[in-house]
Image (spheres, rainbow, N blue to C red):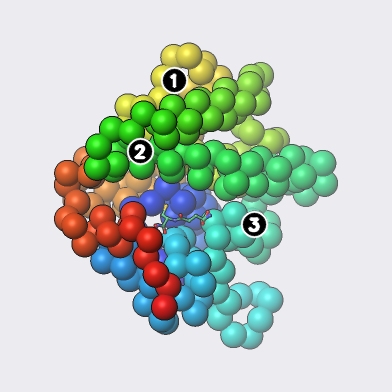
Amino acid sequence: MIELFYWTSANAQKVLIFLEENGIEHKLTPLNVGKGEQYAPDFVKISPNSRLPTIIDHAPAISDKPVSIFESGAILIYLAEKYGRHLSADPLVRLEALQWLIWQVAGLGPIGGQVVHFRNYAPEPMDYPLKRYGAENDRLLKVLDSRLKGRDYIAGDYSIADMACFPWIFAHARRDQIDLESLPDLKRWFLSIRERPAVKRAYDTMFAFTGSPVVKNHGMMDEDERRILFGAHAVK
Ligand SMILES: N[C@@H](CCC(=O)N[C@@H](CS)C(=O)NCC(=O)O)C(=O)O
């Protein structure tokens, strides 16, 4: 059984999509990041960076004890290898999928996160970071759009690279901050993945967590939540 420490998060969605796609027995353990539960000492032991997602595999094939993993990219690779799904056995296609997976965790995710932050959570509009991160995010989206030209998926068949990228495009789309019309191949890919039953189940779960598909913004968070998530939270 896979235990997924979970809160509404694009990065946690990647893992939930993999679990749903493959009918893997799992349990979601809520970890309220707005209340600072990511800094609880027991959680830090398995997730030293205090971030979601993190999993514990209670029945790993590689150890007789439970195995914990942090970082969404590492989790996706672990699951793909354990279950032999969504990462090609062909070394070249596998290498391509891994490059795009790392491109997502190192670029699309962090830059997209800044765009979401400065557009939705900054206490007042800030021109420079909006322009800086907005322009880089636009560039990354164009890179992905070009990659998808003439392809159904990012690297070979539907893979962990698609599962890593999709939640970030979803995060921009649900906030109306992506012009999909100007990114036709990205749009086609996005719409086809959004229709997958497992992906729908993963988002139904996420919406059930918040109670509604409405996204929070700065004005909907209390002072403590803002301090924990956006202040320089000292790790003790
Ligand atoms: N590189 C990490 C990023 C993880 C990350 O930033 N997770 C966010 C949720 S999407 C989080 O835990 N935020 C809590 C916080 O900022 O304190 C990964 O891909 O797993």
Q: Amino acid at mark 3?
A: Ile
Gap in angstroms between the C-alphas marked 3 and 1? 29 Å
Which residue carries the number 3 mark? 77
Which residue carries the number 1 mark? 180
**Mark closer to the observer (3, 1):** 1
Residue 187, how many percent across, how many down? 48, 22
Q: Secondary structure at mark 2?
A: helix
Gap in angstroms between the C-alphas marked 1 and 2? 20 Å
Residue at image position (42%, 47%) is: 10
Q: Is residue 159 visible?
A: no
Residue 141, how many percent across, how many down? 54, 27
Label 1 vs 2, first from the N-terminus: 2
Q: Is residue 159 above or below residue 209?
A: above
Label 2 vs 3, first from the N-terminus: 3
Label 3 crowd bin: few (<14), some (14–19), many (20+), radius 10 Å: some
- The answer as to whether callout 1 falls within 8 Å of ligand 1 is no
Which residue carries the number 2 mark? 118
Label 3 vs 1, first from the N-terminus: 3
Q: Quadrant of residue 181?
A: top left
